[in-house]
Amino acid sequence: MSIRYGTPHRSSSHASHYGRPPSTQYGTPAPQGYYGHATPAPGYATTPAPGYGAPPPPGPPPGADPQLWQWFSAVDTDRSGAISVTELQAALVNGNWTRFDLDTVKMLMSIFDTDRSGTIGFNEFAGLWKYIQDWQNVFRHFDRDRSGSIEGAELSEALRSFGYNLSPTLLSLLEQKYASGPSDRYGPPPGITFDRFVRACVVVKTLTEAFQRVDTDRDGWVQMNYEQFMKIVLSAP
Amino acid sequence: MSIRYGTPHRSSSHASHYGRPPSTQYGTPAPQGYYGHATPAPGYATTPAPGYGAPPPPGPPPGADPQLWQWFSAVDTDRSGAISVTELQAALVNGNWTRFDLDTVKMLMSIFDTDRSGTIGFNEFAGLWKYIQDWQNVFRHFDRDRSGSIEGAELSEALRSFGYNLSPTLLSLLEQKYASGPSDRYGPPPGITFDRFVRACVVVKTLTEAFQRVDTDRDGWVQMNYEQFMKIVLSAP
């Protein structure tokens, strides 16, 4: 029996330039050829004055990229030397100026807070920053109509390029779940903003991989109990 | 073999006063004996002036509760006669003044937008308003330490009272997923705000009921394929 779900392509000969979502491995080559770099949210371009009585801000570690240090310091508004979930949420905006969802910000922190401190240090920030830039390039690539959001066909194409060939039913559920609002009876749901697009892709990847781990004989069917089922679902972003 | 998951109590003799989460059936008796009523977000207490050239605001339907109409009109800031997802999100705040997550607002709209118009009309609003009030009473009841948020033990007690006896592993995953931020290495995750508490409870209910529908022989195990699995997960709020 053939495998019922899309296995991410292993062979680079079949993978497109966007053959998989941005990796969390530091040093993965960034997709190139698209315009622009990520910029921090406006209002953070200048260094905030330290609060009255605040300790002097620590300097960058030796060999740090000055521009990256500048961005890190701009996001670290309380000058604590580490970025909290609140600071990160305040710094991240979508193309339509909406804030990132808390769930997306928590997902990013859980990926990059490698020392489990509850905050993002400078070295962790380097990985996070690159990850967001890579996803921004992916988002721009698949936003074919330059609308600033991802619609149904664009989502389908993005997931297919990552190796996930979801059924029309699943694509429609995904589109509704991650859209910025509900559908009305006259048309499709509104598009998916950047932060929710990233979360949707990571959720599909996480759930598919978890399913595949249970599906040891790779026939597309699993047997699982309530505890396993709930654990898989609640562990996804 | 016994059922591995907590079946919601059917017998009212075993159910506590909070034996199940607020129903979406209009007319369910509200839990009583707790203080206060839900109030709209500040800033909406006065009627906004209609925009230049806007049509005159429609009046309340015959027999409408004047107070409910007043609240509805306050939330319907563009005076369209129906509440959009943006208007609803702007009107709903947690005890700590944070906005409701878009996912919670979309969940509320999907429950109460019974005519699938993409907006909430006045009759739909009556149900939504009661549902939020009922959940606020539940939240206050289980927020034993009056912290304004639900912590691990409080979440566990609330779910148990609804008939969901989740394992410590699942409770911990749930607490982390719906907390307002990540855990740091020194302690438990921060608490769960009102909107995320409601979503957590509805997610547990939705996933458990979906699992039970597949588990036709009620032995706590299911066999499902990738399509079924993803459909269940992506259909939950």
Image (cartoon, coloured by chain):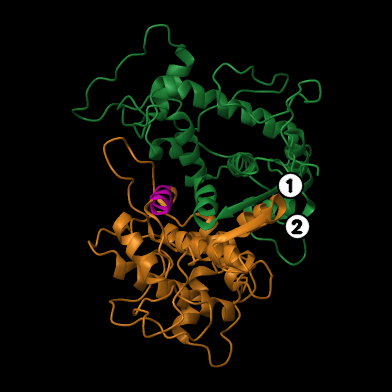
Chain colours: A orange, B green
Label 1 lies in what chain?
B
Between residue B94 and residue A203, name the one nearer to us: A203
Q: Residue B198 in the image: state x and y as whole percent.
A: 61, 39
Q: Is residue B155 above or below residue A72?
A: above
Between discs 1 and 2, the one toward the N terminus: 1
Residue type, numbered disc 1: Glu
Which disc, if any, is residue B188? 2
Q: Specify the segment rendered in magenta.
A: A169-176
Residue that mark 1 sits on: B151
| Quarter assignment of residue B32 | top right
**Which residue: 62% across, 52% down?**
B223
Q: Is A173 included in the stretch rendered in magenta?
A: yes
Find out whether the residues at labels 1 and 2 contact each other: C-beta distance under 8 Å: yes
Specify the quadrant that holds the N terminus of chain B: top right
Alpha-carbon neighbours of circle 2 within 10 Å: few (<14), some, or many (≥20)? Answer: some
Q: Is B46 included in the stretch rendered in magenta?
A: no
Which disc, if any, is residue B186? none
Q: Residue A138 in the image: state x and y as whole percent.
A: 36, 71
Q: State how far apart marks 1 and 2 are (Cα).
A: 9 Å
Q: Residue B104 in the image: state x and y as whole percent.
A: 52, 42
Q: Which SS class for mark 2?
A: loop
Residue type, numbered disc 2: Pro
Label 2 lies in what chain?
B
**Which residue: 71% across, 41% down?**
B218
Q: Residue B13 in the image: state x and y as whole percent.
A: 81, 20
